[in-house]
Image (tube, rainbow, N blue to C red):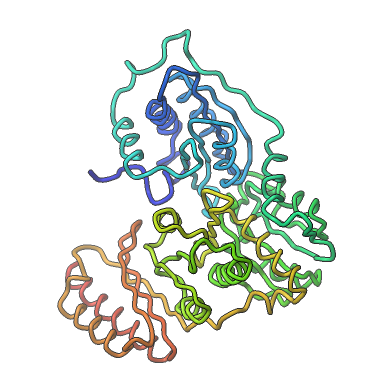
Amino acid sequence: MSRRYFGTDGIRGRANGLITPELAMKVGQAAGLVFQRGEYRHRVVIGKDTRLSGYMIETALVAGFTSVGMDVLLLGPMPTPAVAMLTKSMRADLGVMISASHNLFEDNGIKLFGPLGFKLSDDVEMQIEQLLDETLDKKLAPSAKLGRARRIDGVHDRYIEFAKRTLPRDLSLDGLRVVIDCAHGAAYKVVPEALWELGADVIAIGVEPDGFNINKECGSTAPEALSRKVREMRADIGIALDGDADRVILVDERGHVVDGDQLLAVIAQSWKEDGRLSKPGIVSTVMSNLGLERFLQSNGMEMIRTPVGDRYVLEQMLKQGYNVGGEPSGHIILSDYATTGDGFVAALQVLAVVQKLGRPVSEVCHLFEPLPQILKNVRYRAGKPLDNVEVKSAIRAAETRLNGHGRLLIRPSGTEPVIRVMGEGDDREMVEEIVDTICSALGEAAAAAA
């Protein structure tokens, strides 16, 4: 059965386009019905980021959940990992985050977490999808069993204490000047405060949300403003979160960006030295640089690769017993602490290494040279260009040329009619030639099928 609503990270789309009040209310009703598993009073926690449409969606979700008899606890603006953590710690039956993550304000989304704080399985999402297409009038709660909703205080403090406890008890950030960019998003209050409590000299940007400016020219997807601020303030490090704070990118003291692959290398090496790795290796996606894989291998660690998407990373971590995983985009999952990507907790782990070694971030966070990586997209209108004989021939020829000295990854996008061609290897010119040749063959096949 095909999925109409859920993508790789919940339900996401244009606010008041795909994500309407009607859909949000129906999601509340459907998810509420799926997660009612007994005669007790069921509860759901709802957090959100700072988008204007969050008010509309939150209110509609409350109507949906209460109409099927669930009590609602409203958290207000909170990071996605905080919502996952609070779902479990508050013994809620379900957690909801209203966010479109790193997208601009026009979009929004609904992410759901089960009672243990994990994102829902495909099977549970399909159960909810089926209910979304049904008439639920006869499944609503009787008048006497409707749910209640209330806003709760103190949740910021709970998340701050949780994040601080992921560090060694005696570790302080004294002497570190940190620029934090919260992308005008969900972490704009909690993260600067937590860094200050840990002893850092904090300069906060991206902390003035107005409903429209989330992720706009700031945050982990646009770290240029952070780089400028780090150089201007002569800071030791810059931390860029995205709109819901489940991903992080760092900037070193020179203003150079440190991506998720380098962060994974730092954490994996540090945890291996401290005996904290549950297995000698990490989980990452097919997009992680071959340079990271070679670094890990040279240090006695392996890399398990998954399809793109943090849910697939976590799936393999749980299945195979790894406790470190992530993506180059900065989704870092540390399963000893969190059930989903937590940008702030990942940043704290790196800060702990910086403090322990007493060396500049540019040294600590540059453990390998990334191989040249070329990524191009080929748009098509119809047909299946990847099945074309000439395209298959070009791909075979490319793999022969690389001969184990690089990687080739060709995959259709899951969200648009685009084929992504990624090549990486030791020889940049050869990689560019290979990618261009395949793109040319795909372009001709797409034109012929149009």
Give the number of marks.
0
Front-lying residue, 20 or 398: 398
Whether residue 243 appears in this view of the structure is no
Q: In this view, does 419 lie above or below 344?
A: below
Q: In which quarter of the image is residue 410?
A: bottom left
User: In the displayed image of the protein, which residue is found farthest to the front?
Assistant: 275
Image coordinates for residue 387, horizontal then vertical, percent: 17, 70
Relative placement, left or right, of 303 versus 440 is: right
Relative placement, left or right, of 393 versus 368 is: left
Q: Quadrant of residue 407?
A: bottom left
Q: Is residue 128 above or below residue 277?
A: above
Relative placement, left or right, of 132 versus 367 is: left
Image coordinates for residue 297, horizontal then vertical, percent: 47, 78
Q: Is residue 3 above or below residue 138?
A: below
Image coordinates for residue 160, horizontal then vertical, percent: 71, 46
The residue under the point 68% across, 79% down is: 363
The residue under the point 71% across, 49% down is: 208
Relative placement, left or right, of 369 versus 431 is: right
Front-lying residue, 153 or 243: 153
* Placement of the C terminus among the 4 image quadrants: bottom left
Image coordinates for residue 409, horizontal then vertical, percent: 34, 74
The residue under the point 29% across, 33% down is: 130
User: In the displayed image of the protein, which residue is found farthest to the left?
Assistant: 389
The residue under the point 55% across, 83% down is: 369
Whether residue 26 appears in this view of the structure is yes
* Placement of the N terminus among the 4 image quadrants: top left
